[in-house]
Amino acid sequence: MKICCIGAGYVGGPTMAMIALKCPDITVTVVDMNAARIAAWNSGQLPIYEPGLDDVVKQARGKNLFFSTDVAGEIKQADIIFVAVNTPTKTYGVGKGRAADLTFIESVARTIAEHAESDKIIVEKSTIPVKTADTIKTILASNTKGLKFSVLSNPEFLAEGTAVRDLLNPDRVLIGGERTPEGDQAVATLAGVYARWVPRANIITTNLWSSELSKLVANAFLAQRISSINSISALCEATGADVDEVAHAIGKDSRIGPKFLKSSVGFGGSCFQKDILNLAYLCESFGLPEVAAYWTSVVSINDWQKHRFVAHIGRELFNTVADKKIAVLGFAFKKDTNDTRESAAINVCRDLLAERALVSVYDPKVPAEEIRRDVLGTGSTGSPQGAADNPRLTVAKDAYEACAGAHAIAIVTEWDEFKTLDYAKIFAGMPKPACLFDGRNIVDLAALRKIGFKASGIGKPNAHRREGDTA
Ligand SMILES: NC(=O)c1ccc[n+]([C@@H]2O[C@H](COP(=O)([O-])OP(=O)(O)OC[C@H]3O[C@@H](n4cnc5c(N)ncnc54)[C@H](O)[C@@H]3O)[C@@H](O)[C@H]2O)c1
């Protein structure tokens, strides 16, 4: 059997590496139109940072796992084609800012229709609006070669940072197909691939639309828990309750459960916001504005939480951060990934720069140029990939350099190394009062206060609360 995956990103790369590892008799080729990305997958420096991924790729690459830019050639040879291209939020036209941009999906469907020379199973791995399979089927059916294509939905539930663990031992694999004999056959074929290492009981099969919708709903429910606890974090700060204690107390209720109850500066990542906005847009399209408003509020609370964090910094620094150095520790949207898409750090840096702070960022895995591009956008001069310039934004080589001479430290990503920094040494090199704002609740505030920091967390009883802090 031959598998081809179109899209060598955060999903296509790791998922296919795992299939190749677990199915040595299947040849798996990941293709992408981005030649630099493919070259990186073929090199010693993979394009994405994901714990454990290097090992998995090294074990299979060159044996039954290949990375290539020959999209047309691999389509011809494959029995199963996974589609794992990006489906970002539309930035133009109808549905701008909410609907999913399906340009890449449509283009892939047309490419498959053009180059296929035999019947194929097409698997939607990308997260897409309900009924997208219809669009794909219609485009494929317009091929004039009389070929048969079965379209399946197989959304990916891995989380960046734990992708290898999630793929090795998924809570479930979801496969949606048409309820026809051909559809059932295609579902059975794909289920057979996963069954090499996933217990059958964890392979769920549904109709196409349930599968497509379940992915959006899963992300909406996860994000909703974060916004729910983040909304309570503000109430904790106002009342003297501790949000971690509240989360622990409610999470012990087996009906609620302990996961995804960690309060923070706000969720990021390429998926949560995009998928909720997409879900809300779908609801509106189907005449359900109340349902759309309910889910949109999850994103609104997240935006509010990010701004609230920076507003708090401003108040603690005597209502002005202008010309004060602020160290931003962490830039990735969470630890153990180099992905910065929709990272809260972008908003934090932009809000601080708008107040004319001198922002010094450090992240262990995100390159300096990426940080500058994400915060400042691309410049009008120089290379199209180059970032615009703003001398107020600098990128430090380590946390100590970022914090040297800073009036305040803002921890924005929960990288483990930030838990064990020598904060006494850092404190000694900062003007006083020296402030620390823990946007992830990972450091020991009491210990920092002993050193002399004005330290505050999210949803924590703060020793230095001022009037209006919860606004
Ligand atoms: N990142 C995650 O954690 C995650 C988790 C679950 C699901 N998803 C979903 O999976 C999909 C992919 O996400 P990602 O994070 O891997 O995206 P990504 O941007 O990292 O990768 C997508 C890749 O597709 C390639 N591509 C786009 N159009 C192409 C075409 N016509 N031909 C060849 N290559 C093409 C791009 O060059 C890019 O390398 C999205 O729909 C996303 O919502 C992502």
Image: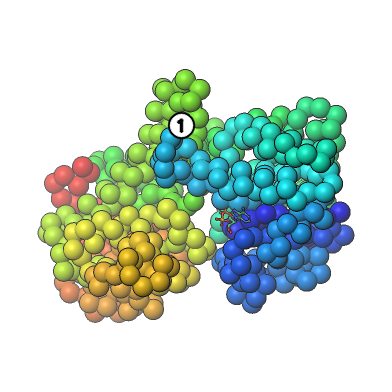
- Which image quadrant: the N terminus? bottom right
Identify the residue at the far top of this view: 287
Residue 198 in percent (x, y) is at 77, 48
The correct choice, above or below, for 165 with respect to 61 in the image is above
How many numbered discs, if any? 1
Q: Secondary structure at mark 1?
A: helix
**The disc labelled 1 sits on which kind of residue?**
Ala
Please give the name of the residue rendered at 56% of the width and 56% of the height, measured from the top-left corner.
160
- Which image quadrant: the C terminus? top left
Residue 40 in percent (x, y) is at 61, 71
| Camera-side residue of 70 and 13 | 70
Is 327 positioned to the left or the right of 432 in the image?
Answer: right
The correct choice, above or below, for 324 with respect to 184 in the image is below
Please give the name of the residue rendered at 32% of the width and 79% of the height, measured from the top-left corner.
401
In which quadrant of the rendered view does residue 238 lie? Answer: top left
Q: Which residue carries the number 1 mark?
A: 280
The correct choice, above or below, for 362 with respect to 183 in the image is below
Residue 58 in percent (x, y) is at 72, 72
Query: Tell me, what colour scheme is on the image?
Result: rainbow
| Camera-side residue of 138 and 408 | 138
Please give the name of the residue rendered at 66% of the width and 32% of the height, measured from the top-left corner.
134
Q: Is residue 213 visible to the viewer in this orientation of the structure?
A: no
Identify the residue at the far front of this view: 144
Please give the name of the residue rendered at 69% of the width and 33% of the height, measured from the top-left corner.
138
| Camera-side residue of 118 and 68 | 118
Q: Is residue 391 visible to the viewer in this orientation of the structure?
A: yes
